[in-house]
Amino acid sequence: MKLKKTSIFCYLDFDSYHCLFSLQNAGILAAYFKLLDIHNKNTLNDVQFYSFMRHVTDLKKREIRLTFDIEFHVEKNFIRHHSSAVFELLDVDGDGMIDSEEFKSLGFLFNLKGHSLSKIFHEFDVSRDKNLNCKEFEVFTMACIYMQEETKKK
């Protein structure tokens, strides 16, 4: 894949040795993404992704669709295989459990708010100890992935 010479990405300063962008370039990319995210959902659907990739790369239609599918698969597998690491990051007090307060404070990460947040927490607290252990959290993340796939199918 090659970037088209007219792409904004050709003008960004990228430190290839350290694989780093400057803070200014990160800000430019964030602003660019906001322009692309016309539905204000902090994500691009397949049509937006396709249009973006056609504009900035030399990839063919089939290659772009494959890239989109691979990206979704990689993201899903990353979450599945790293849910314990994510659990440890979210377990703010390090007690091996995510209590309802920790879960509520991080609900925005899962796009959950208010009553639905409490309901989901209770639903996945299988042990009914008012905490999510690592296994319960893993089931929660898999359910989120499944619901996301079902939503995309509709």
Image (cartoon, rainbow, N blue to C red):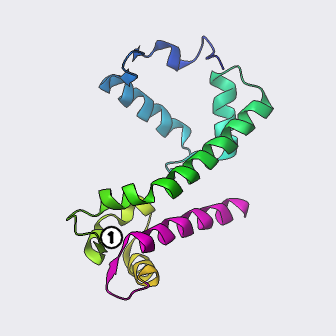
Residue at the spot x=69%, y=44% of the render? 69
Residue at the spot x=26%, y=74% of the render? 101
SS at mark 1 in the image: helix
Q: How many marks?
A: 1
Residue 38 place in picture, x, y as percent: 56, 44
Q: Quadrant of residue 58?
A: top right
Above or below: residue 30 compared with residue 120: above
Q: Nearer the viewer, residue 21 or 85?
A: 85
Circle 1 residue: 103
Which residue occupies the extreme top position in the image? 5
Position of residue 117 in the picture relative to residue 23 (left or right)? right
Which segment is the magenta one?
126-154
Q: Nearer the viewer, residue 31 or 44?
A: 44
Residue at the spot x=43%, y=82% of the render? 119
Residue 103 in view here: yes
Residue at the spot x=68%, y=33% of the render? 51
Above or below: residue 127 compared with residue 24: below
Whether residue 137 is in magenta: the answer is yes
Residue type beneath disc 1: Phe
Q: Nearer the viewer, residue 117 or 42?
A: 117
Residue 29 place in picture, x, y as percent: 44, 30
Position of residue 5 in the picture relative to residue 11 (left or right)? right
Quadrant containing the C terminus in the rendered view: bottom right
Residue 39 in view here: no
